[in-house]
Amino acid sequence: MIYLNSNLNFYYNIFNKAKREKSLADHSIYQWKTETIISPNIDLFNAATPKNLSLLKIEFQSTKLIIIDLVKTKEAVVQIIDHRNESGQNTLIGRTPYMKLPRFPDMSNLYNKKHFGLTQKTVRCVGPERYKKLEENETSEMVAFIALPAHYVGWKLTALGWNKDYDPKGQNLQAAINYLI
């Protein structure tokens, strides 16, 4: 499964043959090749909740999730292996405990660190408003907003960061996704 940080239209060059299947848990569900793509129908902070991500996990009976987020790096595509949440927001606050899960979960091993041939990065997740204003390298728009609740409800995460300025047609991102799936 692939989780996009934004509306599928933003990724049109890459997923132009994706077919919309349905809506579920504040997300749109698409079929692309052999993969299911999930993108938020509402703002990501309110879509990527433990409840919604748990419902998606149960519906698709899947445990592996590839997160795609925007990054500012010197590479077109990077593998995100950790993040520092500098956004001032956390999608878990006020939403835990959920079901029988703990209020304060262990977040020490969020991401798959297996090397897939991409540059591996620890990024600063700064949120959408600051991301638009910053020019600094090693920043991510919203990976923490997805990764925290997804990991909390049991997804195994691999995260890719895409620098759209370096890869405007998404060819490098598509190659990285194809390698992972």
Image: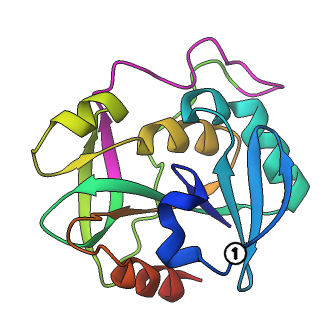
Decide which of 10, 120 is in the foreground and name it.
Answer: 10
Image position, residue 44 (x, y; %) = 56, 36
Q: Is residue 127 visible?
A: no
Binning the other alpha carbons within 10 Å of mark 1 as few (below 14), some (14 to 19) or many (20 upward) gives some
Identify the secondary structure beneath mark 1: loop
Q: Amino acid at mark 1?
A: Ala
Q: Which residues are magenta?
A: 82-101
Which residue appears at 34% of the width and 18% of the height?
A: 88
Which residue appears at 85% of the width and 61% of the height?
A: 60
Q: Quadrant of residue 152?
A: top right
Q: Main secondary structure of the magenta part?
A: loop
Image position, residue 98 (x, y; %) = 76, 23
Q: Is residue 153 left or right of residue 161?
A: right
Which residue is under mark 1?
18
Image position, residue 93 (x, y; %) = 56, 15
Q: Quadrant of residue 31?
A: bottom right
Does 88 lie within the magenta span?
yes
Does 109 lie within the magenta span?
no
Q: Is residue 68 left or right of residue 122?
A: right
Give the image's coloring scheme: rainbow
Image vertical order of residue 60 relative to residue 154, above or below: below
